[in-house]
Amino acid sequence: MHAPSPAPQPSPAVTHARVLAIAVPMIFAHVTTPLLGIVSATAIGQLGEARLLAAVALGAVIFDFLFWAFVFLRMGTIGLTAQAVGARDDVERRAVIARALVMALICGGALVLLQRPIAVAAFQLMGASSDVNAAADTYFSVRIWSAPATFVNYAVLGWLIGQARTVVGLVLQVAINLVNMVLTICFVSLWGYGVAGAATANTMAEYSGAAAGLVVVLVLLGGRFGVSRQVVFDKAKLVRTIAINRDIMIRTAALVTGFAFFTRQGAVGGETVLAANAILMNLVGVVAFFLDGFATAAEQLCGQAVGARDETAFRRAVRLAALWAITFGTGASALFYAGGPAAIDFITSAEAVRAEARNYLVFAALTPFTGVMAFLFDGVFIGSTWTTAMRNCMVAAFFTFIAVWWLLSSYGNTGLWIAFLAFQLCRGVYQGLAYPGMVRRTFEPAA
């Protein structure tokens, strides 16, 4: 699906400088997120109990599934905002953030109300030991209260990225994550609250960030939203927004289900395998978020070009973002492999977990290289609001992942990692096959 914009508008030139001006701040913002995971894992890991480290990893995966299922509040907002900017439609720019905030509060409140049935279902599906589940339930019962604030932060960040205000987004994201890191060290390492302390730190940081984000929104809008209720709840706009969000939600559910499946299969292999895979995936997250910075640049630049009906700017944005993403993805895999052993030893003091993580480091190091095109095309498709095609490609890649795992299941954790690499590769391949047709349909002259 894409937004029609009948009157072409001239777009600012797409240059390397513009790509980097958007990407670099978001790289720094994104990198603090997995660094937060590493700080949390390190604080818990230094307690010397694989059970507690596994519990935090399990709880984090559950919240990845829950919260990232609602990441449409960020992704959809990026595309719609960028297209409103490209079309020079200030009323719609204001209405987009108003709709996103309403949806954020509704979705967050629903998760809080449904927390117990969600927890029961999640722990049954993950299949960890009773000791791990008990500790993870403590983590869950605290962190679930962060849902409304987390979703507000999604909406605010998406709106800022859609306007290429990534420096402001950087400041907000870094502030949230730094507060979280400091509180995690205090609650876990200094005050001894264990997994409950890690969850409390996360919740307090998210609410601090939401309050700051709402202040930023009001400042950028001149102190008021300045858009009528009729415009915010316009039926046609709401239908389009809901359709986009539905597709992104399905796409994200397939993606996070893949990660959850990966974690569950690690849990089946025992606490040591689960903890080792969790450490490697935290390191993967650090590298992946570098690539996500270039996906962010593609989101904003492609969305603005679609709103302005400027095919030349669109194609140049894709080319430049691809160039930077491939360069960084290749280099990141090499650095990952070289620095991985030292990072593993820093995160955990458990020798069995260290040895297990080193056994699979090569597979984790290949993840940025095999997934680079998936990140790039995610940005292009989100900015262009080609959400139906993106959803279909992700679902196809997920089933490819399951098929490859089934064929290689006798190889244990090695087969699981190979299947995961295939998952990342197929995400990019399938979207690449869909890309030419989507460009033609978006920019072809109106009948």
Image (cartoon, rainbow, N blue to C red):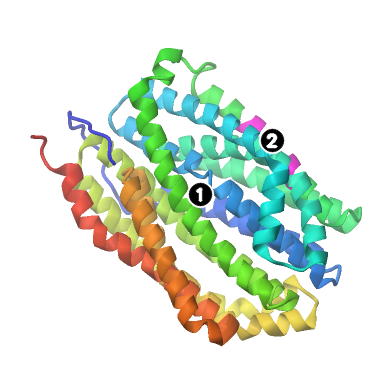
223 or 406: which is nearer to us? Answer: 406
Could you tell me residue 242's position as x and y percent? 41, 34
Residue position marked by numbered label 1 in the rendering = 25
Task: State whether residue 121 appears in this view.
Answer: yes
Task: State whether residue 179 appears in this view.
Answer: no
Residue position marked by numbered label 2 in the rendering = 113
- Left or right: 402 with respect to 153? left
Identify the residue shown where x is 74% and y is 60%: 56
Q: Secondary structure at mark 1?
A: helix
Q: What's the distance in space between the residues labelled 2 and 1, CA to CA?
A: 36 Å
Identify the image quadrant of the N terminus: top left
Could you tell me residue 266's position as x and y percent? 64, 73
> Tags 2 and 1 in contact by the CB under 8 Å rule?
no
**Residues rendered magenta in the picture:** 201-213
The amino acid type of the residue labelled 1 equals Pro
Q: Quadrant of residue 129?
A: bottom right
Could you tell me residue 426's position as x and y percent? 37, 68
Asked if residue 249 is among those painted magenta in the image, a careful observer would answer no
